[in-house]
Amino acid sequence: MTHNAVVVGGNRTPFAKAGGPFAQASNHDLLTAALDGLVARFGLAGERIGEVAAGAVLKHPKDFNLTREAVLSSALSPATPACDLQQACGTGLETTIYIANKIRLGQIESGIAGGVDSTSDAPITVSDPLRRTLLKANSARSAMDRIKPFASVRPSHLKPQAPSVTEPRTGLSMGEHQALTTERWGISREEQDELAAASHHHLAAAWDDGFFDDLVTPYLRVAGDAILRADTSVEKLAKLRPAFGGEHGTMTAGNSTALSDGAATALLASEEWAAAHHMPVLAKVVDAEVAAVDHPGGDDLLLGPVAAAGRMLERQGLTLDDFDLIEIHEAFASTVLTTLKAWDDEDYCRGLGLDGKLGTIDRARLNVTGSSLAVGHPFAATGARIVPTLAKLLHQRGAGSKGLISMCAAGGQGVVAILEAV
Amino acid sequence: MSVPPAAGAADRPVQHLDAMPGMAAAFARALAPSRRDEARLPRHAVQVSGYRQDPARLAEYSRVCGFTLRDHVPPTWLHVLTFPLHVHVLGDRSSTVRLAGAVHVSNSMTLHRPVGVQESLDIAVHAQNLRPHRRGALVDLVGTITVAGDVVWEGVSTYLASGMSTPGEPEEAERPPWEPLVPHATWRLPGDLGRRYRRVSHDPNPIHTSRIAAKAFGFARPIIHGMWTHARALAALENRLPASYRVHVDFLKPILLPGPVGFASTAREHAIDATVTSRDGSRPLLRLQVTEAP
Amino acid sequence: MGALEKAFYSPVGKAVSAKAGLKEPPRLRRGRTWPDGPIVLASIGGGDLASRTMRLLGRATEEPVVDEGESAPGYGSRIGALVVDATAATRIDQLEELRALLRPAVRAIERSGRIVVLARPAAGDWEAQAVARALDGINRTVGKELRGGATATLLEVAPDAGPGDLVSTLGFVLQGRSAFVDGQRWHVDAANQAQDPLAERPLDGRTIVVTGAARGIGAAIARTLARDGARIVAIDIPPAGEALAAVANEVGGTALQLDITAADAGLRIASHVAQRGERIHGIVHNAGITRDKMLVNTDAQRWASVLEVNLAAQMRINEVLLDPATAGGIEDGGRVIGIASTSGLAGNKGQTNYAASKAGVAGLVAAMAPDLAARAITVNAVAPGFIETEMTGRIPFVQREVFRRSNSLSQGGRPEDVAETIGYLLDPSSQGVTGQVIRVCGQNLVGA
């Protein structure tokens, strides 16, 4: 027996720049805060939910059971199970897919998908050589054997290793990868700055409209997204110096996402559960797809969503024109722009094994309440930010409205999903 | 800083401090053994007004004790904020009771309403209720935290000053009967826990961090602060605590570092009982009870 | 703490204040608690409504001691309350009977004890109407003379009201829930209520909307009503969301982040409630702001914001929720509660805008009540006096201490005192109480 998996609503903390107002908050603290706000919004205090799935990209070893621990600190029933799941920046969407699939299969009736990241609380680890030395010393039998391994330790081994978002196989940071892609696809600085400015303006307008009143709960006295610059403009952004791609690069701190802290959650349920519990039903999860590119072989790292979206649309018999709204995660402004270009590139799409290009979209339907450039991007949280946001937007447009979510993720991966208003 | 003259017996002089006093010097003073063995307490209260909490220290405190960082602070954190005033009151010349060497035997606190980390606190402490005990004298240090005239937190820490005397017959304290239990949690307390808790509590007592100091007081190894154990036990109950409540703790036995301890809790109607035990649950080390605020 | 505040709490200051008669205030009995001592029941002119209501409350009563001569007999031990049925008192000489009952009782009343007089609304001949008013003078004066947290209350009961109509009111007055209600008079109409005993959880399963619920009095209202069984919809402005979420989760309710001045606020409340398949039993319009300035410094903006939040917003919300066609609106037999203020009733320097809005609330409930009577919806307001909250904590110390002391109970009230009074008005069996303003002020020395 299959069921419809529907998005009931969501809650997130405001997002803030790393090292900012949430600098002291851990992943656990942030995720608990996001859960508690969700529980309050939907009156779930003491309720047992089918499962909570969430994750963090940067995680301390002690947080191996982060989500379950956050559930235990939250107002949910302690009998609510949870699992940690991680797919880099796609995490928050992948957890949604995971929960939605379980609901559709009838394994659970309700679930919470989420994600959290705190680049302020990133784990600092010891270097590999030092770790090996410590292990050797630990397993030694005599006192002398315990001391000996340390003779091989060099000063450089003692330097703590900060987390990096460097691709292990290419040694390039995500920004450096995207700089190559930007160059290859000929994306101009102006286009990127325009997209970034639009993101801020859209987000600011949505906050002014009270759109986020039932999507965000303040945390640690921060009531709104702290990265948002409502007064930014293409002119102001044009003054920033390139951050990636050398001195002639087009990618700046203004058209790239900032390292951020925050947590997001989405409440999903079967339609039956939602009805029985008198919960709102915003949109159903129609389909999802994950794809990957061969970036170690030279493919564009962040264009995974092209194949993912192509395969999913072919399966559903849909075209880009069928979507009322499209959410493309703004890792970088140029990621969005290259994704759009690639969707409209016959050769590129055929090269991925698709029947042809996906076509163009009406920009007025893209990221209408802003996206990661303005909101910020706590890696694992972003997907769980987008899902309830889009679900609410589609619901406002009326039953049958369709929305597409596209997210790029580290490792050359892309996660996409379709929501449809109920 | 001024000490107003004492007035009628019912009125307690209040010494207003401009800032929270440091504890290191007071502790050094307190380590010098008192020459008298008759316990005497200062009559006055000390107060610090408009105290601003440090969110970074709260975050670190929460991490060390196992609390989730929220806008609302744990009551044990508020105790930590009153602690320098405990030291200050007993460090007064008119006091023959010294905090160093005194044993924290029990603690009761009432959180009257949730207290936010951003709230400015008026913190007052005085000593009272000196009474005999078969091993010395018991004294209560009473802390009161008010926000804008509203009492939000009250705490009573009972210390035993060993070897001190005070007139009267000791009351026979009845220990509730003890049945060994099976702990449902084991906490492995690391050797550096005393140092980590010292950083957030600012309690400089070396008995918690130094083997030598611990030996001087008759312990084989450093012992963890009772208030850490209290906080850790409360943190273990965090999602079951109401918005305001009273929590009473009896510190029964010192806990040596490093080492494992057991933990068990039972929820009853309108109350939660919790016990920190030896690892196997055979001996109680700390007993905690949460009840509704009076 | 300012220098003055320090001085006040210093021993010298305390000695001075003790000389000035400022003693430590009595600790009040609160919650669903009955008086410790016996409840003494008396009747003037043979009315039996009080005795029938006491039977319904299930409380035993004792015979009164009557002061008949010079000897001034006493009770011998403390009594918990005196309930006098004066519904048949219409003659001046019957007031002497009341004196004879009150004199021994006032002497013997315990801490937080109660003196309750039941009377009829002024009617009949000239003397009867004069007597009705005289009872109020007695009530107010007894309230001021009582000590130790004891209070006096005058209940004007409609002639055809039965014990079922009075039970929730008399229960409230005798219990600790009315701790900070003193020297008050209000009406209880006939509402044909079944003769049910006092409910422990009168709001069981009923949906109550509380605005301004994130902190202070609003949070106390949410907690108290949840204790009485209500399903709480806790509303506050979005920036207060974290505190709001904590309150909602604590009481097992739902949080709705909403600015009540938004044009669609009423509809959003209704759709939140309708979504859950419910209708609203009661709404408590607690959200309010102050923008204090002397009138000579009050500009249009300060004026507008206070009237908007404190008065206009709730009128707009009521309009939507009272429309029978609104899904998730207020059910027939429902309750609307406004928050007035003693500042509004008596006037307060520096608060013209606030006083306007709060007196406006009092006017509003009086106007709405008769119009909604056909749907059995009651509309009432409570008028807090000095209540200890974060908001009043910001009042300068001397002023605050003066406010605190200037009532018959010599102390500020607590948020739950306001909440308990609201809970009483929300009680389905309080059907006969409508269009009233009940002050929760410890009988403030100023005010109506």
Image (cartoon, rainbow, N blue to C red):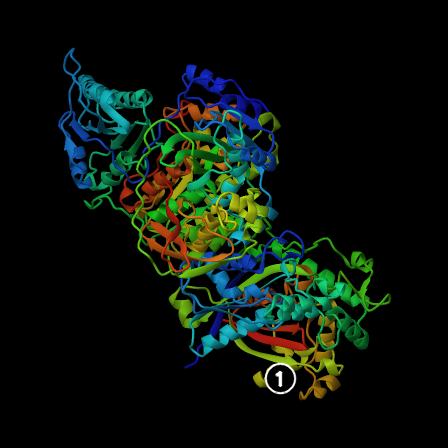
Q: Position of residue C139 (x, y in %)?
A: 29, 23
Q: Position of residue A327 (x, y in %)?
A: 63, 69
**Relative to B243, C375 lies left or right:** left
What is the chain letter for disc 1?
A
Q: Position of residue A403 (x, y in %)?
A: 59, 72
Specify the farthest residue to the right: A248
**Relative to A343, B107 lies left or right:** left
**Relative to C7, C31 lies left or right:** left
Q: Which residue occupies the foreground of this view, A413 or A351? A: A413
- The residue that appears at 71% across and 73% down in the rendered structure is A167
Identify the image quadrant of residue C42.
top left
Compared with residue B253, is residue A190 higher up or lower down, i.e. above or below? below
- The residue that appears at 56% across and 32% down in the rendered structure is B49
Compared with residue A293, is residue A176 higher up or lower down, i.e. above or below? above
Amino acid, disc 1: Arg
Q: Position of residue B61 (x, y in %)?
A: 55, 49
- The residue that appears at 43% across and 80% down in the rendered structure is A2
Q: Is residue B192 visible?
A: yes
Indicate the quadrant containing the N terminus of chain A: top left, top right, bottom left or bottom right: bottom left
Compared with residue A287, is residue A189 higher up or lower down, i.e. above or below? above
Identify the image quadrant of residue B142.
top left
Identify the residue under disc 1: A311
Q: How many numbered callouts? A: 1
Q: Is residue C363 visible?
A: no
